[in-house]
Image (spheres, rainbow, N blue to C red):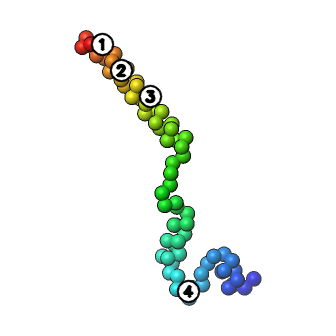
Amino acid sequence: MDKESWGKASGCTPAGSDASLLDRYEAMVESRVPRNPRPPLGAVLFWIGITVIKGALYGVGLLFILLAVGLI
C-alpha cells in the first residue's frame, strides 16, 4: 500500500492540502461531541424523585420543629 492510498484510507489529508490542522481538529471535535446532548430519562426521573423526597423530609422536619417549639 503506497502513502497516498494509506492516507485516504485512514482519513488523513496530505501535508500539501488546503485543510489546516485547526480545521481538521474542529471537524474531529464536532463529529465526536453532540451539539445538544440530552441526559438519559432514568437519570432525570431519579433526580426529580430525590428532590421530591428531600422536600418532603425537610417539610416533615420543619413540622416537628414547629410542634416542638409550640408554634402549631
Disc 3 marks which amino acid?
Ile
Label 1 vs 3, first from the N-terminus: 3
Q: Quadrant of residue 56?
A: top left
| Res. 53 mark | 3
Q: Is residue 67 left or right of residue 27?
A: left
Residue identified by numbered label 1: 67
Q: Point out the residue furthest to the right here.
A: 1
Residue identified by numbered label 4: 17
Q: Nearer the viewer, mark 3 or mark 4?
A: 3
Q: Position of residue 62 (x, y in %)?
A: 32, 21
Residue identified by numbered label 2: 61
State which quarter of the image contains the C terminus. top left
Cα distance, mark 4 to mark 2? Answer: 68 Å
Rendered view: 16 above or below 57: below
| Res. 8 mark | none
Cα distance, mark 3 to mark 4? Answer: 59 Å
